[in-house]
Image (tube, rainbow, N blue to C red):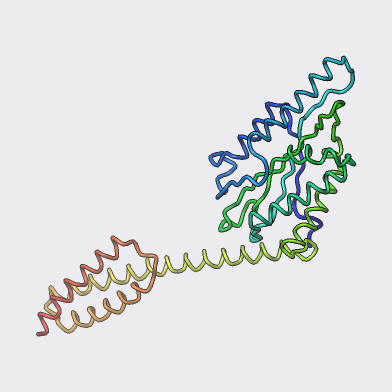
C-alpha cells in the first residue's frame, strides 16, 4: 500500500525564460536525464502553449508596472506537476489524456473560477508524456510533465495562487489516485511496491548468479579439454593408440558439454572445434 501515486509540484522559476527552458527540456530526448526515456509524446498543447503561458505572465507584469501597483511581484508564471506511475504499470496515450484531463478539471474547481474562464484555463495547459524503458528496473516509470499557467487575463488579471499551495498538491494527488483507479482499475491502497521490487531484484540476482555459474563452468570445461588434448598428443608421440582413443572419447564428451553452454568466446570455441576435427581425422586414420 502507498498513500498516493507519485506527484511532484514545483513552480516554473525565471519567468518567461524559465517557461522556455522547460519547454526545451520536456522535448529533448538527448538530455542526460532522458537516457532511459524511450519516447516523448505531446498530450496537450504545444510549443505555442508555452509561449502563451510566458506571454500571460509578461502581460501581468506590464500591467502591474503601468498601474504602479505595489506588492509582491509574480515569482513564477506557471506551476509544473509531474505525475508518475511505477515501473510495470503501462497506460496508453488516451488513458494518460483522460487522467491528466481529470486532474486539470479538479484543479480548475479548486481555483473557484467563473465558468467563463474555463477555456482560457484549458488553453494554458501543456502536458508531455515521457515513456521509460521498462526493462530497466531502477529509475522512474512513465510520467507526464504538466504545466499550468498561474495567470488569467481578463481586464483585471487573476493569479491562481492555489495551484502552487499545499492544497493544490493535495487535490491533484487525490485526483490522480481516482483517475488511475477509473482508467486502469488500480488502487494505490492495494499496490505493494516493496514486494514487487524485491521480486524483481531477486530474479535479477538469480539470473546473474546463473550466468556466473555457466561462465565458470565453461572455463572449467575448456581447461579440461586442453588437458585432454595434451594427453592425446603425448599418446600420439608414444604411438599409444589405446590411450589416443581413450582421450579422444573424453575430448568428445567434454566438447559436447561445452556446446550446451552459452558463455564461450566464439573464437575460442572455433579453435577447439578445429583442433578436435584434426584429432578425429588422425585417430580415425590410425584405427582404420
x and y percent of residue 208 in the render?
52, 63
Q: As rendered, which of 31 and 218 lies closer to the eye? A: 31
- In this picture, residue 212 sits left or right of residue 56: left
From this view, report whether residue 163 is shown above or below residue 96.
above
Left or right: residue 238 versus residue 24 is left
Identify the residue at horizontal 57%, vertical 64% (top origin). 205
Relative height, residue 45 to residue 176 (above, below): above
The x, y position of residue 167, in whole percent, is: 88, 44
In front: 253, or 246? 253
Q: Quadrant of the N terminus?
A: bottom right
Quadrant housing the C terminus: bottom left
Numbered disc total: 0
Horizontal side of 274 relative to 256 (left or right) equals left
Image quadrant assignment for residue 89: bottom right
Identify the residue at horizontal 77%, vertical 37% (top origin): 79
Q: Relative to 88, does residue 72 appear above or below in the rendering?
A: above
Q: Nearer the viewer, residue 34 or 209?
A: 34
- Residue 250 sits in quarter: bottom left
| Quadrant hosting residue 10 | top right
Q: Is residue 283 left or right of residue 272?
A: left
Q: Residue drawn at (66%, 62%), measured in percent from left and top?
A: 197
Q: Residue at x 78, y 61 (%)?
A: 188
Residue 263 place in picture, x, y as percent? 39, 65
- The location of residue 95, given as percent across then percent down, is 68, 57
Amino acid at each position: 500500500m502507498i498513500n498516493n501515486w507519485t506527484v511532484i509540484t514545483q513552480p516554473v522559476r525565471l519567468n518567461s525564460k524559465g517557461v522556455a527552458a522547460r519547454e526545451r527540456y520536456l522535448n529533448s530526448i538527448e538530455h542526460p536525464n532522458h537516457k532511459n526515456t524511450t519516447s516523448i509524446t505531446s498530450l496537450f498543447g504545444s510549443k505555442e502553449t508555452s509561449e502563451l503561458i510566458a506571454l500571460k505572465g509578461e502581460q501581468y507584469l506590464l500591467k502591474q508596472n503601468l498601474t504602479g501597483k505595489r506588492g509582491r511581484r509574480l515569482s513564477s508564471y506557471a506551476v509544473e506537476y509531474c505525475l508518475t506511475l511505477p515501473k510495470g504499470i503501462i497506460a496508453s496515450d488516451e488513458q494518460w489524456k483522460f487522467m491528466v484531463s481529470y486532474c486539470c478539471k479538479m484543479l480548475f474547481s479548486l481555483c473557484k473560477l467563473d465558468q467563463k474562464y474555463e477555456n482560457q484555463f484549458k488553453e494554458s495547459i501543456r502536458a508531455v508524456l515521457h515513456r521509460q524503458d521498462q526493462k530497466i528496473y531502477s529509475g522512474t516509470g512513465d510520467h507526464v510533465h504538466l504545466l499550468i499557467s498561474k495567470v488569467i487575463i481578463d481586464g483585471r488579471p487573476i493569479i491562481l495562487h492555489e495551484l502552487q499551495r499545499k492544497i493544490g498538491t493535495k487535490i491533484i494527488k487525490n485526483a490522480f489516485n481516482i483517475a488511475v483507479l477509473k482508467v486502469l482499475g488500480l488502487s494505490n491502497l492495494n499496490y505493494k511496491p516493496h514486494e514487487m521490487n524485491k521480486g524483481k531484484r531477486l530474479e535479477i540476482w538469480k539470473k546473474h548468479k546463473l550466468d556466473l555459474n555457466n561462465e565458470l563452468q565453461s572455463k572449467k570445461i575448456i581447461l579440461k579439454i586442453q588437458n585432454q588434448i595434451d594427453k592425446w598428443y603425448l599418446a600420439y608421440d608414444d604411438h599409444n593408440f589405446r590411450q589416443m582413443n581413450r582421450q579422444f572419447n573424453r575430448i568428445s564428451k567434454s566438447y559436447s558439454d561445452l556446446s550446451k553452454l552459452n558463455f564461450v568466446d566464439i573464437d575460442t570455441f572455433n579453435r577447439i572445434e578445429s583442433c578436435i576435427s584434426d584429432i578425429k581425422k588422425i585417430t580415425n586414420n590410425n584405427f582404420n
